[in-house]
Image (spheres, helix red, strand yellow):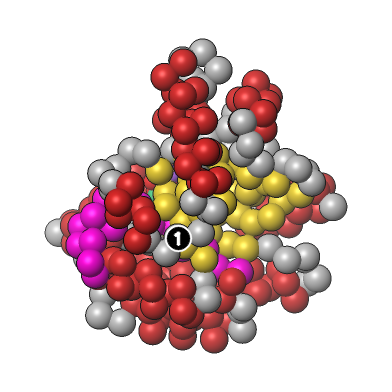
């Protein structure tokens, strides 16, 4: 209850901020998008990691208001960058199971896009396998509606959840995000290497895009490129940074 009221207060006091981490196409070397990641700047506790408050927000349902704020802020921020003349970029936003289960989630996404004046295909929603498996039939129905709306869909943390390949076939997703757990020891652990190359091949065969997260070293980058993964995200390129600093990251990439 204490944490719940602290989270509600944080929303009112605007203590949440969005950080952005670039997603790079290593074929062209260009930043093609960014993932929005929430941070909590508490006046006394300092920066609170999402791992500490997202689970509480999920349990208490506060994730609905928080998630709505994240979606709106990320879309408005992208629109601002576009109006400043930044080339075509997309923004990836994490979606929780509770949001997906909301009665009119698709309608609220449509409203946010319209209010921000953002083209739907600039928005990518990241869904986790566990979110989708929570209620597969409902999730598939919502995914279809979101596709009709024109937004992009990604499966986050791919390979760590419980979705089967039979389900994947029915998901109207555009992107598989290879979980950083597989990328970390990619160059030294043959099992991780096998898993990663298999996910890349799976994506190619299903005509899906594939992006690796948690890329920290040139060795990892080289391995991924050699095996056909050209979109990457990770500390090797940039840590998640506040919107103000992201402008400079984009400038450097010009
Ligand atoms: O940014 P960081 O690596 O600390 O994020 C930790 C976890 O919090 C990740 O699993 C990430 O997906 C999740 N997360 C970050 N921002 C959001 C958000 O806006 N909404 C939701 N639902 N999860 C988020
Ligand atoms: O679950 P999700 O993939 O949304 O969470 C992404 C998380 O991974 C964020 O908390 C982000 O800060 C973190 N992250 C991003 N890049 C790297 C990286 O290169 N290495 C590590 N260890 N974490 C990363
Ligand atoms: Mn994510
Ligand atoms: Na992930």
Quarter occupied by residue 238: top right
Question: From what the image shows, is residue 200 above or below residue 175?
Answer: above
Front residue of 188 and 15: 188
Residue 16 visible within the image: no
Compared with 220, 176 (above or below) is below
Q: Residue at x 53, y 80 (%)?
A: 113
Q: Position of residue 136 (x, y in %)?
A: 23, 61
Residue 153, percent across and down?
A: 47, 62
| Residue 86 visible (yes or no) | yes
Q: Which residue is mark 1?
A: 173
Outermost residue on the top side: it is 188
Give residue 62's position: percent from left, percent from top. Answer: 26, 65
Residue lying farthest to the left in this orientation: 1
* Residue lying at 72% horizontally and 51% vertically, measured from the top left: 31
Quarter residue 222 falls in: top right
The residue range painted magenta reads: 122-138
Nearer to us in this view, 62 or 112 = 112
Residue 32 position within the rendered picture, expressed as x and y whole percent measured from the top left? 69, 55
């Amino acid at each position: 209850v204490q944490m719940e009221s602290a989270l509600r207060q944080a929303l009112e006091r605007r203590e949440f901020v969005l950080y952005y981490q670039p997603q790079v196409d290593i074929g062209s070397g260009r930043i093609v998008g960014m993932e929005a990641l929430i941070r909590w700047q508490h006046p006394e506790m300092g920066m609170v990691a999402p791992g500490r408050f997202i689970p509480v927000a999920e349990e208490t349902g506060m994730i609905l208001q928080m998630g709505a704020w994240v979606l709106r802020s990320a879309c408005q921020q992208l629109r601002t960058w576009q109006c400043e003349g930044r080339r075509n970029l997309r923004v990836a936003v994490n979606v929780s199971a509770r949001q997906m289960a909301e009665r009119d989630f698709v309608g609220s996404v449509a409203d946010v896009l319209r209010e921000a004046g953002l083209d739907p295909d600039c928005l990518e929603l990241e869904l986790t396998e566990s979110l989708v498996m929570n209620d597969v039939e409902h999730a598939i129905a919502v995914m279809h509606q979101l596709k009709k709306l024109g937004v992009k869909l990604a499966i986050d943390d791919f390979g760590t959840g419980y979705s089967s390949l039979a389900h994947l076939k029915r998901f109207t997703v555009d992107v598989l995000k290879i979980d950083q757990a597989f990328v970390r020891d990619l160059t030294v652990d043959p099992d991780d290497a096998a898993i990663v190359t298999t996910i890349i091949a799976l994506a190619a065969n299903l005509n899906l895009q594939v992006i690796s997260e948690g890329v920290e070293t040139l060795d990892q980058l080289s391995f991924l490129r050699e095996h056909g993964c050209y979109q990457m995200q990770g500390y090797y390129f940039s840590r998640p940074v506040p919107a103000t600093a992201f402008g400079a990251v984009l400038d450097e990439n010009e």
